Image (cartoon, coloured by chain):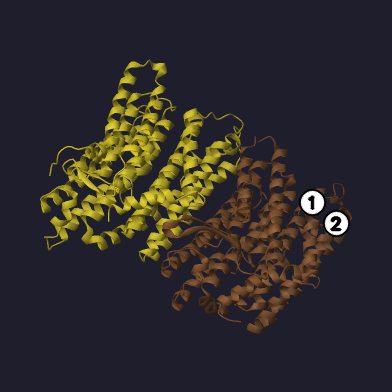
Amino acid sequence: MQFPVLSLIVFAPILTGIFLLLIPKDNKTEVKVTALAAAIVTLVLSIWVYFSYDTQLGGYQFQEQYSWLPAMGISYFVGVDGMSVPLVLLTGIVMFTGVLISWKVDDRPREFFAFLFILATGVFGVFVSLDLFMLIFFYEIAVFPMYLLIAIWGWKVTREYAAMKLTLYLFIGSVVALVGVLAMYYSSGLGTFNMLEMERAGFSEAFQKLWFPFVFIGFAVLGGIFPFHNWSPDGHVAAPTAVSMFHAGVLMKLGAFAALRVGIMLLPEGAKFWMPYLVILTLVNVVYGAFIASVQTDFKYVIGFSSVSHMGLVIMGFATLNSNGMLGAGVQMFSHGVMTALFFAVVGMVYDQAHTREIPLLGGFRKVMPLVMLTFIIGGLVSMGMPGFSGFVAEFPIFMGLWTSYPLVAILAVISIVITAAYIIRIIGKVFFGQMPQELESHMHNVTVFDKVALILLAGILVVVGVFPGVMVPIVQSGVDNVIRLLGGA
Amino acid sequence: MISTFDLTMIKAILPEIFLVLLGIIIVIVDLTTKEEQKGVLGWISAAGLFFIIIISLLFALPGDQSISTWGGMIRYDWLSFVFMILFLFGAGITSLLAMDIPNLGRRGELYLLLLASTLGMCLMASSADLVMLYLAIETTSIPMYILAGFMTQEKKSTEAGFKYLLFGALTSAILLYGFSLIYGFTGTTNIYSLAEGFSKYTNSLPIIGAFLLVLVGFGFKVAVFPFHFWAPDVYEGAPTPITGFLSTASKAAGFAVLIRFLIIVYPEYTQLWSALLAALAVATMTLGNLMALTQKNMKRMLAYSSIAHAGYITIGVVAASQEGFSAVIFYLIAYLLTNLAVFGAVSVISRTTGSDEISSYAGLSRRAPGISLVLLVGLLSLAGMPPLGGFIAKFLIFASAVNAGMIWLAVIGVLNSIIGLYYYLIVLKVIYLYRSDDENSPLPIPKAYVLALFILTFGIILVGTIFAPWFSWVTQAAAAMF
């Protein structure tokens, strides 16, 4: 038997979380050090998985399977393919940087990190599960800690409202998808939740057309699909920095990923039927999200709506149902995850100093925190899809794929790049280069070493993937090939 | 009919025999100990009940064949066995939770009544005869009436006991009338011969009429709409550990009788009762959840939530399949663990603070992190979140509805569970988010509570993560009906 690395990645966070709860509540430093150690272990393991994934071989690797509830064909079945490997790595990165950024948390850090790590287990579990029941199981584990994390440690003004809104939206999505999953289980007649077997179930076309929207949109709610995106900016803004990073960086990918894995891969005929309609929704996401972002005055809301816009691109890539679009969407999930984690980290640092996020009231941070500015600019360039940064590697194939399938949509969607450039450049100009208001000048400090490590890591990854797309594209491509095969064609 | 005496007969009622013995021990100890040493009674009761569970598991496991014994009065099968274990466990935990409550835990009558009621429940799960069933239901109910009104110096408790008695007596009379009609039609009281007796009637109207009367009685026990009116007041007024017992074991006993009765006595009318119960399930869960939304008192909220849960469980009955019944029993196991944990936490909090208002839980997470965690686990399990027992229970219930072709029912169920999540989260918000002035004053937790709440929390997580063993139990229990 091989080394159970995926199980270790999945369970290390939750076990650490339980262990943290056992530490006496006054030992705040011990809590943070333990959390950091666990995050490093998980990061190292996920890096190892990423680099030892064999793209020549393709398919699902590092598989482990144990029976869980044999009577219903439920098993604990994990494995990663080219689509999920980058996401596992992404989660490892965001978890590590999230812990670094959260070093300042002083109100009950024990509970904070415990809930954050339970969330991480849910996220990892979804990315690696090859069993449909297990996917739902971990999906819902990922939903509820969010409530407490936002409600307890979030921004006082909107946290109660935003946390409840977010949790209810996501829970509605997941239970709707659950009913769809049950319908799939019983109509397949296979008596198993094993997704590799369900891929061959041969659901009737009528069945697929009926259930695809429920399953796909049920999951895509978490991906922020229009018109169910409303929870996301509110949730991002209300959440504490590390949770925003996790949330926009990883959790939204969870929705998109599950929609792909369950919706498109198990119900391909349904996908072919519905995608021309869904692509319109994602177009609204992309363009409308960017417009809304450009008129926000709150720094964090800008980033929140930019997530809606960028996640729209991911689902739009899926909607093309061709190789280019899927490839771009796969890379975009990773790229946007790192980028948005970087953005939220920067927003958090600026807010900690200025105690406001109103863009007109900010300015001149270039002098105080030059490194933060530099990394934000890198993130901004990624966001605009500039060549040489990971955003280009992701968005260019999406638009290529879009052009082959829906040329008109492609033309309209490209507008979003211009708008994105507008709001990013506005922020850079005002927040970092503008004149620093006098009332701020007195109490500005640069960021801590932990913050710098996190920012450099995140920005570095964006550049590396942009300059050497070869570290990621072949892996994602091997995953995409499998999806295309299920869709029955080139 | 009456066969010679053999060992199976003893095995069939082994838990009941030991319950009587334990009751006698309690009486003797109560009479012989001094006032200051009465704390030992709770431990004896709890230890005795767990001892009975072990003895039953070791010596009284039923075989694959269901057996009618004691002259056809008792059915000795997996269904009755699994429920017996459940009741004994519930009673054991309730003893632990009750023993440190002032004016309650140091009185022998409490444990005696609890044991008597448990005895009745065990017989309810296994009775195979209308007379036996009626006696069992009364044996369960009468001690519960007294227990609900046990705090005689408190108005609310007295009211609870009296209200429960009035509703109980009325529905029990209706139930008995239904039984008498059934006996009149068939000429037998043996549950397993009734269906045959019905088959000679071409006019089904009176048979359905009798069924409706019986349903009133059972509906009262499990608190489904429209027989739920007693529940909120009784749950609020009764001593909290008793409320926990009432809302779990007593409800489970009701469901045990219900599924046996429906499938054995009315197999010809499956479509009818399935449709009827589907309507009741929808009404019950929707009403329970909507009413729970507005509650300010924790016990009242839990009362409405337990009505809603009765609605979910009924979905499994509606499916009228082995899978559905397995889901019902699984749900009852998870629900018993969860609700006892929540009521236990409520009880230990109000023991110090003297309040059950949700607003009084402000600052609790700083004051008592352990209890807060129990409530977190318990409430999320009630909301159906993994990796807790409530999730898999709900999953199985909805799965059975989908498999029975009632997707609409599953959809209503999941929509309801969203309302549920909302009001459970409200409580958690108060616990974890709000501050209060007395958040630094200690909240002592007696040893018995630590033990009980640990067992329950551990159980909730265990049922929610490793389900195969329990699932094979409940499948076997459900299979005894088919």
Q: Residues within 10 Å of mark 2 (few under 14, many from 20)?
A: some
Q: Amino acid at mark 2?
A: Leu
Instruction: Identify the subunit bearing mark 2.
Output: A
Name the residue located 31 percent from the left edge and 54 percent from the top edge.
B479
Q: Does residue A138 appear to the left or right of A468 in the view shown?
A: left
Task: From the image, state the color of chain B.
Answer: yellow
Instruction: Identify the subunit bearing mark 1.
Output: A
- Residue A451, label in figure: 1
Q: Does residue A403 appear to the left or right of A439 in the view shown?
A: left
Establish if A91 lies above or below A284.
above
Tell which of B83 and A476 is nearer to you: A476
In the rendered image, residue B312, in percent from the top left (x then y), is placed at 39, 54
Question: Quadrant of residue A78 in the image?
Answer: bottom right
Q: Seen from this angle, which residue lies furthest right?
A: A367
Q: Amino acid at mark 1?
A: Asp
Name the residue located 59 percent from the left edge and 39 percent from the top edge.
B365
**CA distance for labels 1 and 2:** 10 Å
Tell which of A489 and B376 is nearer to you: A489
Q: Does residue A79 appear to the left or right of A50 in the view shown?
A: left
Quarter placement of the C terminus of chain A:
bottom right
Task: From the image, state the color of chain A.
Answer: brown
- Dot 2 corresponds to which residue? A371
In the rendered image, residue A82, in percent from the top left (x then y), is placed at 65, 68
